[in-house]
Amino acid sequence: GAGVSQSPRYKVAKRGQDVALRCDPISGHVSLFWYQQALGQGPEFLTYFQNEAQLDKSGLPSDRFFAERPEGSVSTLKIQRTQQEDSAVYLCASSLGGGQFNYGYTFGSGTRLTVV
Amino acid sequence: AQTVTQSQPEMSVQEAETVTLSCTYDTSESDYYLFWYKQPPSRQMILVIRQEAYKQQNATENRFSVNFQKAAKSFSLKISDSQLGDAAMYFCALEDGGATNKLIFGTGTLLAVQP
């Protein structure tokens, strides 16, 4: 596609519910990032994929968070047993290679998750 | 640890005037990259301007320019001839020089443009 597509755009989950957030990167983009943006804050890194390999998951806040990209294209961020502190916008970005400066990231419009 | 600090939560500027948004950062790397992003209500992060740390010349993109002070670890954004469409959240970001190349963002500055 022309851009990075994220779905759903909005998600309301009851506390304790599991959710899955989807990211469709630009076709052919090797690198894929997930960021979490809490209200009034800047985005914070969650995890990074190069093709299907998850090379860095140091930003995942707990073992309730899990991300995958099984075929090196679409990625899913799963949050189990959601808590109120998980409420945030989840942004996905993709690029042809590594690094914003050399390759340029394209960000999606994010999924706003609200846990009630 | 690498950090990015934006000390101005909100700024306001009159249309056609100039405004400067401040950013300071900390990193132990000698070579790194700095960015300013714009985030409108659509939530998509849009790259405004970028700077390589080893280049002393300040980057410029049309009405947007930076004042990069490496020794002071300061990276401010100047918007000239402000337009209504410039109203948005602006984030300063530092690219991690490690294998991941992840971005470290500041907390943002909300810019209002008054007609």
Image: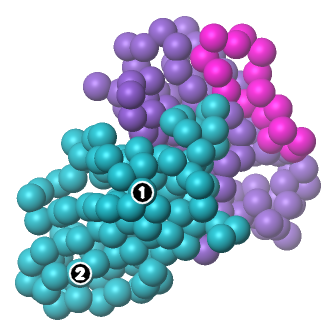
Secondary structure of the residue carrying tag 1 is loop
The stretch in magenta equals: B51-66
Q: Earlier in the sequence, mark 2 or mark 1?
A: 2
What is the x, y in percent for residue A67?
Answer: 26, 61
**Quick one: quadrant of the C terminus of chain A?**
bottom left
Q: Is residue A35 left or right of residue B15?
A: left
Between marks 2 and 1, how big is the CA–CA gap? 21 Å
| Label 2 packing within 10 angstroms: few (<14), some (14-19), many (20+) | some
Q: Mark 1 lies on which chain?
A: A
Question: Depth check: B91 or A94 in front?
Answer: A94
- Please tell me whether residue B91 belongs to the stretch shown in magenta: no
> Which residue is denoted by mark 1 in the rendering?
A72
Drawing shade for chain A: cyan
Q: Is residue B9 visible?
A: no
- For the rendered model, the colour scheme is by chain
What is the x, y in percent for residue B79?
Answer: 79, 44
- The residue located at (57%, 26%) in the rendering is B33
Amino acid at the residue labelled 2: Val
Question: Depth check: B7 or B26 in front?
Answer: B26
Where residue A19 is drawn, which disc sits there? Answer: 2
Considering only vertical position in the picture, is B84 above or below B100? below
Secondary structure of the residue carrying tag 2 is strand
- The residue located at (36%, 52%) in the rendering is A52
- The residue located at (61%, 74%) in the rendering is B42
Residue B16, picture quadrant = bottom right
| Label 1 packing within 10 angstroms: few (<14), some (14-19), many (20+) | some
Considering only vertical position in the picture, is B99 above or below A68? above
**Quick one: quadrant of the N terminus of chain A?**
bottom right
Where residue A102 is drawn, which disc sits there? Answer: none
Output the letter for the chain in purple. Answer: B
